[in-house]
Image (cartoon, rainbow, N blue to C red):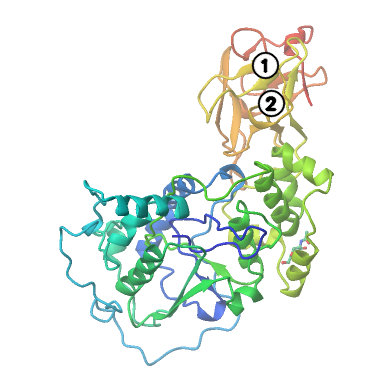
Amino acid sequence: MRLLRRHYGPLKLAMVGVVFVIFVFIMHKDVGSGSKDDPWLKNIVERKDQVLDMMMGAVNNIRDSMPKLQINAPMQQEEPEQKVNSCLPGYYTPAELKSFMERPPQDPNSPGADGKAFKKDKWTPEETKRKDDGFTKHCFNAYASDQISLHRSLGPDSRPPECIEQKFKRCPPLPTTSVIIVFHNEAWSTLLRTVYSVLHTSPAILLKEVILVDDASVDDFEHIGSYDDQMEIWGGENVEMSFRVWQCGGQLEIIPCSVVGHVFRTKSPHTFPKGTQVITRNQVRLAEVWMDNYKEIYYRRNQQAAKMVRERNYGDISPRLKLKEDLKCKNFSWYLQNIYPEMFIPDLSPTYYGAIKNEGSQSCLDVGESNHGGKPLIMYPCHGMGGNQYFEYSTQKELRHNIGKQLCLISKYGPGQVELKECQYKGKGTSVPGNEEWEFTKERLLKNIGSNLCLTSRGEHPSTIECNPGDIHQRWGFS
Ligand SMILES: *[C@@H]1O[C@H](CO)[C@@H](O)[C@H](O)[C@H]1NC(C)=O
């Protein structure tokens, strides 16, 4: 079940959103200030990288350009909440948080009961046809879904213990919630089971409404810009929405204790006639509208995007810029400072960047296949595509390979291989250790400050050796 989807677009196609997340749009007035200090939340926030990694891994194909999402909401702004004096002290009891609807008892042998897989040995021709039709239309076994109870329980509670055990103070009262489920061409049984699941699991006193939207006609959603209607199919619209909601005064929260299922389909119901161009184009649109100068950080890492920008080949963004102005949205520096202050921001203008070409071998320094640190580097024909050959010579004199993670080229003390390691410099309060600091000399040697040795392309792998300005295998240049 997708919780959000594109609105217009030529093909009216659905998007795949963040699957483990319930998106809740909460305008400031609805946000309670209650539970910020709760230890369970702190605990989860501390583990958020783990949680997020799991989420990110499952979600998307734009991992590298996707920012990690925010968990802790910013401090309440403006209008101090009126003190509510009518609530009782102590914590809500389970009885008070009783769900809207209780699950009826289930036959443990019924199809899919308690989260078991749907199994069926004998199929009549009629049933087989219905199954095949389901696959054709929905790309999953809609016939199986139709056989499973709408009240299906998933068996034992799969949430982490600290989620199950958490308690909520009665004062100030928890805010009520509207659950908005946006759908398109959805199989009815999965959609309805989602609705029942909300009714079976949400405390009745907190559930204001369940809104099912086909065609995104909710007024508030239109007001805050719904979807960028010139983005195609999917890719980037979830990030666009996140930036937009935060920058324009809303909040988009991840509820780590919320568990949402996702039906993976046998194939994408969408075709990408223009290949990855579509995703890049969407990302360029969002970068152009929301990221100000920081968009350059992305363009340096994505040649296809940079080319698209040079050729102004990403469509008209003026309606989005107007929306940004009409809603008086804040800029991207504000977003980084206030919403995601813990993020390390790569140099806006690194001293040098691109591929590092060796004069002797006429090849480029390359991190090799899936090198997330620890493996030796290689010399490889220069391909000009960035990727494994992308480096930045930072203003702190590090050699950063920072397409996804912030990895630094380190030299071990004593002659030997060089390798990538997570950069020690992470902004304020940290510094660059000598073995991560490289002087780019007048003779174009890359001299490591810690070991006093120079980078050479000789040997099986790039390594460090006594500096010799006469050796062309020690001479490098950014291109
Ligand atoms: C971004 O907005 C802040 C106020 O929130 C302002 O101080 C700053 O100058 C703005 N930056 C740019 C680059 O416009």
In the rendered image, the quadrant that contains the N terminus is bottom left
> Quick check: can you spot residue 106?
yes
The reply to whether the C-beta atoms of the residues labelled 1 and 2 are less than 8 Å apart is yes
The mark total stands at 2
> Image quarter for residue 407?
top right
Q: Is residue 413 above or below residue 360?
A: below
Looking at the rendering, the quadrant in which ligand 1 lies is: bottom right
Relative to residue 144, is residue 305 depicted above or below?
Answer: above
Name the amino acid, label 2. Answer: Trp
Percent x, y for residue 469?
78, 10
For mark 1, does the 10 Å Cα neighbourhood hold few (<14), some (14 to 19), or many (20 or more) residues? many
Q: CA distance from mark 1 to mark 2?
A: 9 Å
Which of the two marks, 1 or 2, is nearer to us in this view?
A: 1
Is label 1 in a helix, a strand or a loop?
Answer: strand
Q: Earlier in the sequence, mark 1 or mark 2?
A: 2
Amino acid type shown at disc 1: Leu
Q: Is residue 421 left or right of residue 192?
A: right
- Percent x, y of residue 281: 71, 49
Decide: few, some or many residues near mark 2? Use Cα within 10 Å; few <14, some 14-19, many ≥20: many
Residue 403 is marked as: none
**Observer-nearest of 249 and 204:** 204
What residue lies at 65% left-to-right and 31% top-to-bottom? 387
Please give the name of the residue rendered at 77% of the width and 41% of the height, measured from the top-left corner.
306
Q: Give the residue pinned by disc 1.
A: 455
**Residue beneath label 2, please?**
438
Instruction: From the top left corner, tell me how far across and down residue 419 is, in percent.
Output: 56, 23
- On the question of residue 399 being in view, the answer is no
The part of the image, by quadrant, that contains residue 171 is bottom left
